[in-house]
Image: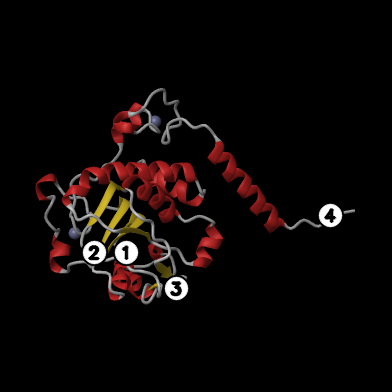
């Protein structure tokens, strides 16, 4: 007798077991997998010394859009931000989206790797700790939300998983109740400039009836053109929040 098997359900269960195994595994270096014998440089204890040397820190960038700039131009708004100031008061990207970030971030996102996201969030916190005295301190952290349908499909919200260690380290309230994604939009990576803006029209909504801070910071994993962050910032500002900044893990140069 043949037992009917629900293939979809089976894949779901195997996916979940694999995810748990990955989370429990004692890992070596997050990038190359080599054993890490002691705390890495600058407290980066999830990296071997070799990989710690090559992390693409985004040290010189436009303060408004985090676009990497030559050292002598850093600290001033780039040409694009001067011509058209973004709705974000400031934007900080911890890394440039180059190797190994272009492997670590999608890996963490599509395999639900909580341990990797936690480490990436800790690195962001360490970089922000150095950077924060130069910008006003926000009152709350708001992770860029996924639409419910996408969250159900993926089972994992990378912006929220990066925001958790950030909120803990920087002792800021995590307000994932504030902003809603009300439309399940096409992934921005498949669209060009004007289509990106159109795609995001009315995509975000600020939840009514919750106390609003005056100054929040949006957190996301990867920033490409910033269109998504700008749409979210506009929604927050329309609701009465005075200042919105953004912190992202990596900026696509
Ligand atoms: Zn390594
Ligand atoms: Zn800029």
CA gap, disc 1 and disc 4: 49 Å
Q: Badges 1 and 4: C-beta atoms under 8 Å apart?
A: no
The residue identified by callout 2 is 88
Reading the chain from its start, which is encountered first: label 1 or label 4?
4
Quarter, ligand 2: bottom left
Q: Position of residue 176 (x, y in %)?
A: 42, 61
What residue is shown at x 51% (from left), y 61% (from top)?
A: 151
CA gap, disc 3 and disc 4: 41 Å
Name the mark on residue 3: 4
Reading the chain from its start, which is encountered first: label 3 or label 2?
2
10 Å neighbourhood of mark 4: few (<14), some, or many (≥20)?
few
Q: Badges 1 and 2: C-beta atoms under 8 Å apart?
A: yes
Q: Nearer the viewer, mark 3 or mark 4?
A: 3
Q: Position of residue 122 (x, y in %)?
A: 36, 42
Reading the chain from its start, which is encountered first: label 1 or label 3?
3
What residue is shown at x 38% (from left), y 52% (from top)?
A: 163
Q: Position of residue 206 (x, y in %)?
A: 38, 72
Name the mark on residue 182: 3
């Amino acid at each position: 007798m043949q037992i009917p098997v629900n293939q979809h359900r089976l894949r779901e269960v195997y996916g979940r077991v694999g995810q748990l195994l990955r989370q429990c595994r004692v890992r070596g270096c997050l990038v190359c997998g080599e054993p890490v014998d002691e705390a890495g440089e600058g407290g980066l204890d999830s990296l071997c010394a070799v990989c710690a040397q090559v992390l693409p820190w985004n040290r010189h960038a436009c303060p408004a859009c985090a676009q990497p700039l030559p050292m002598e131009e850093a600290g001033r708004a780039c040409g694009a931000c001067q011509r058209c100031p973004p709705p974000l008061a400031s934007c900080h990207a911890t890394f440039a989206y180059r190797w190994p970030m272009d492997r670590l971030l999608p890996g963490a996102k599509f395999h639900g790797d909580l341990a990797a996201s936690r480490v990436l969030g800790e690195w962001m916190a360490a970089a922000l700790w150095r950077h924060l005295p130069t910008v006003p301190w926000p009152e709350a952290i708001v992770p860029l939300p996924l639409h419910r349908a996408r969250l159900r499909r993926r089972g994992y919200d990378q912006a929220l998983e990066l925001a958790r260690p950030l909120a803990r380290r920087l002792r800021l309230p995590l307000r994932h109740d504030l902003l809603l994604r009300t439309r399940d939009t096409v992934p921005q990576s498949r669209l060009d400039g004007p289509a990106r803006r159109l795609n995001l029209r009315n995509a975000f909504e600020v939840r009514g009836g919750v106390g609003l801070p005056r100054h929040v910071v949006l957190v996301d994993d990867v920033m490409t053109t910033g269109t998504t962050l700008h749409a979210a910032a506009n929604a927050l500002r329309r609701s009465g929040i005075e200042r919105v900044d953004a912190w992202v893990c990596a900026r696509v140069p």
